[in-house]
Image (cartoon, rainbow, N blue to C red):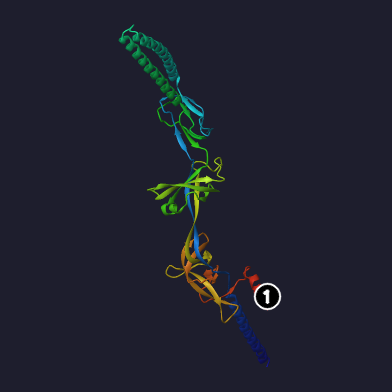
Amino acid sequence: MRWRSRHQILIPLFLISMVSAGCSDDVDDATSSTRAILVVEILDARAEPGYSVFEAYAGRVASPRTSELGFDRPGRVVALNVDEGDRVEEGDLLGALESRGLRAEIRELRARRAATAARLEMAKLTTQRSETLAGSESISEQRYDEARFNQIALEADLEAAKAGIARAQIALELSELRAPFAGSVVMRSVDEGTVVTPGQAVFRVIEDGAMELRVGIPLETAMSLEEGAVYPVEIEGRKFKARLDTRIPTVDPDTRTVTTILQIAGDGDPHDSVLRDGALGRLELETTREGRGYWLPLSALTEGRRGLWSAFAVEPDPDTPELFRVEGRDLQLVHVETNRVFVTGTLHDGDRIVASGVHRIVPGQRVRLAPSPTRAPQVANETTNTGG
C-alpha cells in the first residue's frame, strides 16, 4: 500500500509538470512569434522631374599678367635693386647695366652736334652773302653754289649728330630695367657682375590685381557656360566667386579639355593669403538633368536580380491591420551621390519605402512601422479633425 500510494502521488506530479512544460512552450512560441515581427523605419517616395549633378573641375590660380624681364642689350650688370618677394610699382628701376661708355659717347656726340651747329651758322651767313654778291656779279656762280651746298652738308651732319645722340640715349635707357606694371617679383636669376645677353631672363614679375583661375573643362560643358556669368569656385579650401572671362578656342590634345579663364571677383583680394599664382582651385558647377525619378538613401537599396537593384515598399496587411507586408520594387540607378541615389523603376509616388535594415527582410514578410516624429502630429491632427 505504501508503494502504490507513492506512485499515486508521483504520477499526478509528472502529469502536472508535462502540462506546465506544454504551456511554457506555447508561451515561448507566442513570444517568439511576436519578436519575429520586425520594426522598420520608412520614408515616402516622392517623384522628382529631374536631378542636379554637382561637378568640380580642377585648375590653377594665375596672375593676369606674368613677365620674364631681361635687358634688350648685352652688358655687365652693375645694379639690382629688388629681390624675390619685393613689390614694385609701374616704372620702378629694377636693375642696370654698365653704361659709362654710353654716357661718354653721348657727351662726344653732343660736342660734335654743337660744333656742327656752329659751322652751320657760319655756312648760312656765307650763303646769304654769296647770294647778294652773286646778284651784283661780284662773285662767280660757282662760289655761290659752293657756299649753298656746304650749308646743306652741314645741315645733314647736324641731323646725323642728333640721330646719334638719340640712338645712344635709347641704348642708355635699354641699360635700365624697369617694371612694366605694378606687381611682385617672384624670381631673380642673376646677381651683380653677371654679363647678360639680350633677352636673358633676369626677373619674373607677376601683376597685382584680380587673380584668374584657369580650368580645363570638357568641350560640351565649357560651351554651355555663359561668358560674364559668375560661378562658385574653391581655392585652397576657401569659397570665392569668379566671373567667366573667356574660353581658349582650342582643345588640349592631351586632356581633351578647353581652358576656361575666370576672374576671381568680389571678395577676391589679390593680397589674400590663398590667392597666389599657382595655387590649386576648383570650379564647381551644378547641372540639371531632366527625367522623372526618386531620391532614395543608399541604406534603402538591396541587390536585386540581373544586375538590378531593389527597394522594399510596405502595404497594409489585410489580416492584421496593425501590421504591414513587404513588397519588392525593382530599380535602376541613374545617379549616385555620397549617401543617396536617384532611381527609376517600379516605384510609385507616395510609396512607403523601408529606409534601412533591408538585409533583415524579404518580400512577403510582415513588419511593424516605427513611430515617425514627423508623422505623429499629422495622425493626431487627423484624429482630432475626424472627431470634430
As drawn, is 355 to the left or to the right of 167? right
Name the residue carrying label 1: 384
Residue nearer the viewer, 144 or 254: 144
Which quadrant: the C terminus? bottom right
As drawn, is 135 to the left or to the right of 310? left
As drawn, is 18 to the left or to the right of 116? right
Q: Position of residue 120 (x, y in %)?
A: 40, 13
Crowdedness near tag 1: few (<14), some (14–19) or many (≥20) residues, C-alpha within 10 Å: few
Which quadrant: the N terminus? bottom right
Report the amino acid beneath label 1.
Answer: Thr
Q: Position of residue 365 (x, y in %)?
A: 53, 76
Q: Position of residue 7 (x, y in %)?
A: 65, 89
Question: Does residue 49 show up?
Answer: yes
Residue nearer the viewer, 182 or 34: 182
Q: Secondary structure at mark 1?
A: helix
Q: Position of residue 33 (x, y in %)?
A: 58, 78
Q: Which residue lies most toward the top here?
A: 138
Quadrant of residue 146 within the rendered picture: top left
Quadrant of residue 8 within the rendered picture: bottom right
Residue nearer the viewer, 263 or 285: 263
**Rendered position, 169 above or below 269:** above
Residue drawn at x 51%, y 48% as measured from the top left: 243
Q: Which residue lies most toward the bottom here?
A: 1
Residue nearer the viewer, 173 or 199: 173
**Rendered position, 58 above or below 5:** above
How many marks on residues? 1
Question: Does residue 238 show up?
Answer: no
